[in-house]
Image (spheres, rainbow, N blue to C red):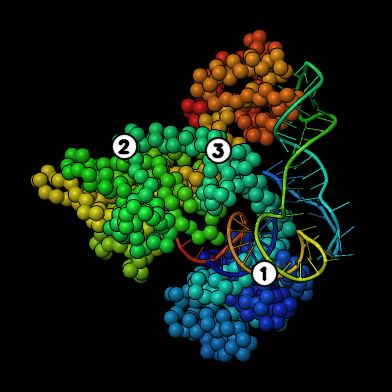
Amino acid sequence: MPEENNLEKMRHSCAHVVAAAIKELYPNAKFGVGPVVENGFFYDVDLDTPLSDADLKNIQKKAEYLVKQNIAFEREDLPIDEAIKFFESINQTYKVSLLRDLKEKGTTKMTEEELQDVGGSIGTVSLYKTGNFTDLCRGPHIESTKEIGAFKLTKIAGAYWRGDINNPQLQRIYGLCFETKEQLAEYLNMLAEAEKRDHRKLGQELELFTFSDLVGPGLPLFTEKGTTIRRVLEDFVWSLMKPFGYSRVWIPHIAKSDLYKTSGHWDKFSDDIFHVSSRKTDQEFVMKPMNCPHHTQIFASRARSYKDMPIRLSEVTTVYRDENTGQLQGLSRVRSITQDDAHVFCRLDQVKQEVGSIWSIIKDFYKAFGMPLSIYLSLRDDTHKEKYLGTDEVWNKAEDSLRNFLKAQNLEFVEEKGEAAFYGPKIDFRAKDAIGRYWQLATVQLDFNLPERFQLEYIDQNGEKQRPVMLHRAILGSVERFMGVLIEHYAGAFPVWLAPVQVHFISVSEKHIDGSRELLTEFDKLGIRVSIDEANETVGKKIRNASKQKIPYTIVVGDKELAGEDWQIRVFGQEEQISMSKENFVKRVKEENSERKA
RNA sequence: GCCGAUCUAGCUUAAUUGGUAGAGCAAUGGUAUCGUAAACCAUAGGUUAUGGGUUCAAGUCCCGUGAUCGGCUCCA
């Protein structure tokens, strides 16, 4: 943590108290690291037995008891060798390994979490004592345990020691910690709100998508309503792209493995590629895990002139990735990923203009949802050059052109080393949702490597062959993931322009069914998404059902409405009904639809 | 993939120590034809995720498999 304010001191101290509590309950516990994280802290611990929720409650009780004892945090500075001896003597092997690492390699190989424990100096390290528990810690701490506000241990999870899959797994205990009980309650409340918005729950309730054991994990099936939203999103993003000269293409969903051997993806990502075997040929096929190699072949299908550039190929299409089962999650992480993908083949001097039009599309797109964007420039980690394809010169050129664009536009952005794709640097956009969470969705990636690998060419003014540059870009990112984000952003209550059903008619009694059906047809012809409830139920019941489906407009159709009187219109989320003529209502809905009103 | 937890009807769930699987909503059929947030009656729906094991007896205990959830790792 860059700044050590009181809250952070308190959270870090709280982590120590929890560790002390664990030490008392489980004397053999070996401790990993216990850093401050957002809203609290965690502590990694190696125990003989797995912890249960009941154990977590016990630890919480013990920690609360320690807090009440008002134990002081005492600091002691020790030369590193003595500290190593000390932790060896109490059998804290993880702390010893951290200290040894610090001694040998300095701080460079340490994560921020680890640094919170070991501190930044190689000569001396500091130890903090809380009652019977002594921990390696950079500090600073609060004076005594009494100063700890409200805390709650929330969950137990597995975590690899030092984040390495080859290391043993420790049990990670997460805790929340705030200055006051009220703040803790408020945060727990926010979590409950987020849970209410969970797209997996809402997706089922609103009948947007489903999963089937027979179809398989990570393979969502979209119902009519979910598909309507997908179509609206696709149409919207296409309407923004079209003015910039994008063309639409179509590619098959499988390809020979040779395609990815040529592209370089084969070696790098073979674990995540679904293989398709054929009995008719020895050739190896795979489900496409990305679209760029296919698109390069459309570019390469004929001779290209400098006059034709840029060539902008776009497509909303599904890729398939064999994700580990443990990381599948609702629509956020799936195995069939629909990308709103486009590849722009252009001359180097056209990159700025193309990135400019992509930025314009992204800006307008996210504005429609009221989601502010933060911008990140993802660069190569130049201490691990072996992880990337392409030469230094190519990388520097690519990184500079993106940076220069952002600067020229006067956009605020954060540079992030090590976040680039293996084939090139990129600009990532993180969108902020209604409850303040950030999602990485849109991206623009520069790629000098694929044109090289596929030997792509165009003919310049002098009749000479030139290599184009390639831009990869997505506006929504993945349609599935974006839908998940949108469902949670709107808590399932979509604005009119996105709502799968915009207007819902409820017939009062049997004699109004015919009239309601005529209205249905009329509205449908006007391009309004409309549904009807003519069930043998009370009006109250039908209103309740419409409300549960979060339909923007609900209208009870009886004698008065059919006779041409003003309609009483229920607006979702509003107590008061509005009164309006049918004509004005139609006008309002069409306006809200075309203007994409929030 | 790894660590931990969970799985009972379409959904939400009940079932004492191991002793007859029960309900609400939804669905279906009927009655009422109803004016703004749950009408009434009835019917059907279950190899308790799945395969083994222990036991006189398993939803309940044990083991394997699958899916889901919370994390870790990964995310072109």
User: At 57% across and 90% down in the image, what residue appears?
Assistant: A85
> Which amino acid type is shown beneath numbered disc 1?
Cys
Dot 1 and dot 3 within a common chain: yes
Provide the residue designation for mark 2: A247
For mark 2, give the secondary structure: strand
User: At 51% across and 37% down in the image, what residue appears?
Assistant: A227
Provide the residue designation for mark 1: A14
Provide the residue designation for mark 3: A223
Task: Point out the tag, 2 or 3, that comes first from the N-terminus.
Answer: 3
Q: Let me know if residue A66 appears in the view.
A: yes
Q: Is residue A356 above or below residue A379?
A: above
Q: Chain of mark 1?
A: A
User: At 27% across and 62% down in the image, what residue appears?
Assistant: A390
Cα–Cα span, label 1 and label 3: 47 Å
Coordinates of residue A477 in the picture (x, y in percent): 44, 47
Cβ–Cβ below 8 Å for labels 1 and 3?
no
In this view, the residue in front, A287 or A125, is A287
Q: Chain of mark 3?
A: A
